[in-house]
Image (cartoon, rainbow, N blue to C red):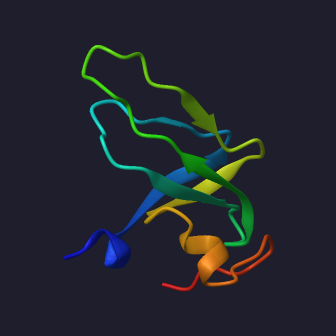
């Protein structure tokens, strides 16, 4: 599978501020945070670490989220997926 087709959906049991980091991740990723109502509330472009020794930057949801989608960098903008878009299973 190529990076462009990679999509990882994380489902949490509750809605709250989520924090992610790129520990030992050497490729850039985009991340989308979705509310309990499955609406896209925030996206971020996550930068890869340059070494295993680097302390990775954290990326938080800025608003409570229950679903998190990790995709190829720039995926949300390339696919014209704007805030408020609905997540379908």
Q: Is residue 22 left or right of residue 24?
A: right
Question: Percent from the top left, x then y, of residue 12?
Answer: 49, 53
Question: Percent from the top left, x then y, of residue 9?
Answer: 42, 65
Residue at the image point whose x is 76% and y is 41% from the top: 62
Depth check, front residue: 40 or 77: 77
Q: How many marks?
A: 0
Residue at the image point whose x is 33% and y is 79% from the top: 5
Vertical order, 50 against 65 (above or below): above
Q: Is residue 54 left or right of residue 58?
A: left
Depth check, front residue: 18 or 32: 32
Depth check, front residue: 62 or 80: 80
Q: Is residue 65 left or right of residue 74?
A: right
Vertical order, 28 against 80 (above or below): above
Residue at the image point whose x is 34% and y is 28% from the top: 50
Question: Percent from the top left, x then y, of residue 22?
Answer: 40, 36
Vertical order, 70 against 5 (above or below): above
Q: Is residue 28 left or right of residue 26?
A: right
Q: Quadrant of residue 84?
A: bottom right
Outermost residue on the front side: it is 50
Residue at the image point whose x is 34% and y is 48% from the top: 27
Q: Quadrant of residue 52?
A: top left
């Amino acid at each position: 599978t190529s990076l462009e087709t990679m999509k990882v959906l994380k489902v949490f049991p509750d809605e709250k501020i989520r924090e992610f980091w790129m520990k030992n991740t050497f490729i850039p990723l985009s991340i989308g945070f979705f509310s309990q109502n499955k609406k896209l509330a925030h996206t971020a472009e996550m930068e890869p670490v340059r070494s295993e020794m680097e302390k990775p930057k954290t990326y938080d949801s800025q608003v409570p989220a229950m679903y998190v989608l990790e995709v190829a960098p720039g995926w949300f903008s390339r696919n014209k997926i704007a805030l408020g878009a609905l997540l379908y299973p």
